[in-house]
Amino acid sequence: MRKTRLWLVTVAWLLAPAAGIAQTTPYYYRIDDFGSIVRYDGFDALLADEASQSYGSISTYGDDPGFFYDPSRNSYFRVEDGGAVLEYATLSDFLSNTNATLHVTVPTYGNDSGFFYDPDRNSYFRIEDLGFILEYGSFAAFLGNAVATNYGQVLTYSGDADFFFDIVRETYVRVEDGGAIVEYPTFADFVSNSNGVPLTTVAAYGNDRGFFVVSAPSIPALPAWERIALGLLLLVGGGYSGRRFGRTAPRAGGCASARGRGRDRRHSTWRMRQTRGFIAVRSRLK
């Protein structure tokens, strides 16, 4: 029975990624018009304005037109009201406004409605203050304001609070100036302002400066080869039952038989070798 359980545990361990055990928790960040930074754990929490954590306020953030997360660079971006494009290498840097890298200043960026990165298209997007939707095919193009495609003007996008691509839901989200949250299933829907799904309205969102989402792993998934190595160690190491190497029952006088003591010594020696082997393999995996 014990061996059967160990087999089942090992198989479950090896197949965990395929079974979907390694999940992700989406964190949605909101920067309001006072520069306060708030995190929502999940899209439903964002819709309900049920904040999970507040990181305080950075007053200069309250004047800026756009913030976004770039998963291709694993960094955070801020576009200042004067058009400066700043990059933060870590979330802690962004939350404290420290160690920012100033890439360039494009004065016209300072008046725009929103910016975001779309990993599906590997492009950067800018929604101008007049509602024009502009696509940049590379980071260098974005910094140089070298527009790849102009998708035309959507007048109602002018003056909205922000826009972002939801990397978890793979949809385009618009936060209107009145606080309405509208979701577009496809890129074509977004650029044409069609088939938008109104989800809710949070009036306070209408004055905010930016929104973005980061997909944070809740259960780190080991690479396949590490899972296989550890799974085999579990199988081989745990596959020996206590009956094979365990103690024999003590005699009436309370003393174990010589044969039992011999088995105890073999068992202890084998366990010591097994433990050393596990530590050696695990150290290589780190």
Image (cartoon, rainbow, N blue to C red):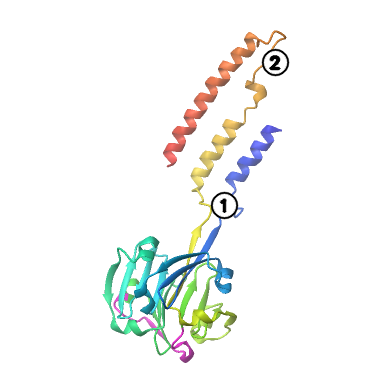
- Residue 181, image quadrant: bottom right
Image coordinates for residue 198, horizontal then vertical, percent: 59, 82
Q: Which residues are magenta?
A: 143-160
Q: Point out the frontmost of discs 2 and 1.
A: 2
Q: Which mark is residue 17?
A: 1
In this image, 185 relative to 247: left or right? left
Name the residue rendered at 65%, 22% in the picture.
244
Image coordinates for residue 133, horizontal then vertical, percent: 42, 84
In this image, 23 relative to 109: left or right? right
In this image, 210 relative to 255: left or right? left
Q: Marks 2 and 1, how far apart in space?
A: 43 Å
- Compare marks 2 and 1 and give the one earlier in the sequence: 1
Specify few, some or many for label 1: CA neighbours under 10 Å numbering under 14, 14-19, or 20 or more.
some
Q: Is residue 140 visible?
A: no
Q: Is residue 108 visible?
A: yes
* Residue at numbered disc 2: 249
> Which quadrant holds the C terminus?
top left
Q: Which mark is residue 39?
A: none
Name the residue rendered at 44%, 87% in the picture.
159
What amino acid is found at the position of numbered circle 1 in the picture? Pro
> Which quadrant holds the N terminus?
top right
Q: Is 108 drawn above or below residue 21 in the view shown?
A: below
Specify few, some or many for label 2: CA neighbours under 10 Å numbering under 14, 14-19, or 20 or more.
few
What amino acid is found at the position of numbered circle 2 in the picture? Ala
Secondary element under disc 1, as helix, strand or loop, is loop
